[in-house]
Image: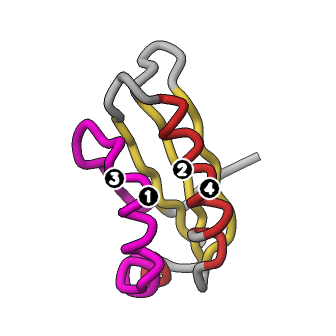
């Protein structure tokens, strides 16, 4: 399993719209992708324009070669990218310890 961490900064004026859009996209698009395991979206208290998305995948390839090259990815981008203030930072991690 790998963890995709996404640091998202949105335009300050539309938090509610973004939250509706990403919630819909996570439930109806991303969660149906092959290799998808789970997600968590968090909203920053100190910086209200900032969100952290955590997605667990079976492998990096399920995200980078599978989902990102699927028609669902284009639908995902159409849904959430209009809210972005800048391109999100996306990185992949291996879990080395958890509780």
N-terminal of the pair, mark 4 or mark 3, is 4
* Residue extending furthest toward the left: 86
Give the distance between the C-alpha atoms of the residues marked 4 and 3, in whole angstroms.
13 Å
Which residue is rendered at x = 62% and y = 56% of the image? 24
Label 3 sits on a secondary structure element that is helix
Nearest the viewer among 86 and 12 is 12
N-terminal of the pair, mark 4 or mark 1, is 4
Residues at marks 4 and 3 touching, judged by CB atoms closer than 8 Å: no
N-terminal of the pair, mark 2 or mark 1, is 2
Which residue is rendered at x = 60% and y = 59% of the image? 26
Label 4 sits on a secondary structure element that is helix
Specify the segment rendered in magenta. Answer: 63-92
Residues at marks 2 and 4 touching, judged by CB atoms closer than 8 Å: yes
Q: Which numbered disc, 2 or 1, marks the residue closer to the eye?
A: 1
Residues at marks 4 and 1 touching, judged by CB atoms closer than 8 Å: yes
Residue that mark 1 sits on: 79
Give the distance between the C-alpha atoms of the residues marked 1 and 3, in whole angstroms.
6 Å
Which residue is rendered at x = 47% and y = 13% of the image? 46
Residue that mark 2 sits on: 22
Q: How many marks?
A: 4
Residues at marks 1 and 3 touching, judged by CB atoms closer than 8 Å: yes
Report the disc number at residue 81.
Answer: 3
């Amino acid at each position: 399993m790998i963890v995709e961490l996404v640091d998202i900064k949105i335009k300050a004026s539309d938090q509610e719209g973004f939250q509706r859009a990403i919630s819909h996209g996570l439930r109806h698009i991303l969660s149906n992708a092959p290799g998808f395991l789970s997600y968590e979206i968090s909203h920053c208290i100190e910086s209200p324009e900032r969100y952290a998305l955590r997605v667990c995948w079976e492998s990096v390839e399920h995200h980078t070669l599978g989902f990102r090259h699927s028609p669902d990815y284009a639908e995902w981008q159409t849904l959430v990218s209009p809210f972005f203030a800048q391109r999100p930072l996306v990185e992949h991690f291996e879990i080395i310890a958890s509780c």
